[in-house]
Image (tube, rainbow, N blue to C red):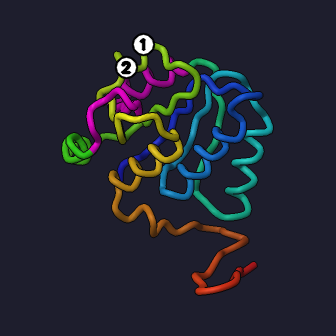
Amino acid sequence: MRKITILRINHRHFRDHRISTHVGLAARALGANEIIYSGEKDEALLESINKITAKWGGPFECSYNPNWKSVVKEWKKNGGKVVHLTMYGMRIQDRIKEINSDKSDLLIIVGSEKVPWDAYELADWNIAVTGQPHSEVAALAITLEKLNSKSLEVEFKEAKIKVNPCEKGKDIED
């Protein structure tokens, strides 16, 4: 199975902390292998995601790289492909077969502040979940599900906590 890495570019601690955390949580829960943050270094963000992985299981890696462009260039140099999530791209439903037929490892770019034009140029696919303003967390979740129809059945190793399906209330194993 191919590796899927999320690249959250231009994170701003004060403005993006909560949403960037949610990008990481959605990435982990839906089967991505890792997330790399660029922009402002945010130790609390890294610690939060790594704590979740330690408690709820993995594998999932979370790291920081100040230079998002070097991450993309290195990824492509190693034979991987790049998907940039943007509401201005091609509709995911029109391109998902093409993306899934290419078995290369995927780097999925998720922006925060205004995305630099270089991201559009470096991407192999500029993909829109809708052509409307929406949450980058929602776009990532839909994209991961379309890339892997088993994304809702991900199993986590070494989990210290597990939630069992329950009609009412909470059924949690420690």
- Does residue 101 lie above or below 59 as drawn? above
- The residue that label 2 is drawn on is 120
Residue type highlighted by circle 2: Tyr
Q: Residue at x 36, y 31 (%)?
A: 82
The N terminus, quarter of image: bottom left
The reply to whether the C-beta atoms of the residues labelled 1 and 2 are less than 8 Å apart is yes
- The residue that label 1 is drawn on is 117
Q: Secondary structure at mark 1?
A: helix
Furthest residue toward top: 117
Q: Residue at x 41, y 51 (%)?
A: 142
Residue 30 x %, y %: 49, 57
- Does residue 97 lie above or below 77 as drawn? below
Residue 153 x %, y %: 45, 69
- Gap between marks 1 and 2 measured at Cα: 5 Å
Q: Residue at x 39, y 31 (%)?
A: 87
Residue type highlighted by circle 1: Trp
Specify start and end residues of the magenta stretch as a single range.
Answer: 68-92
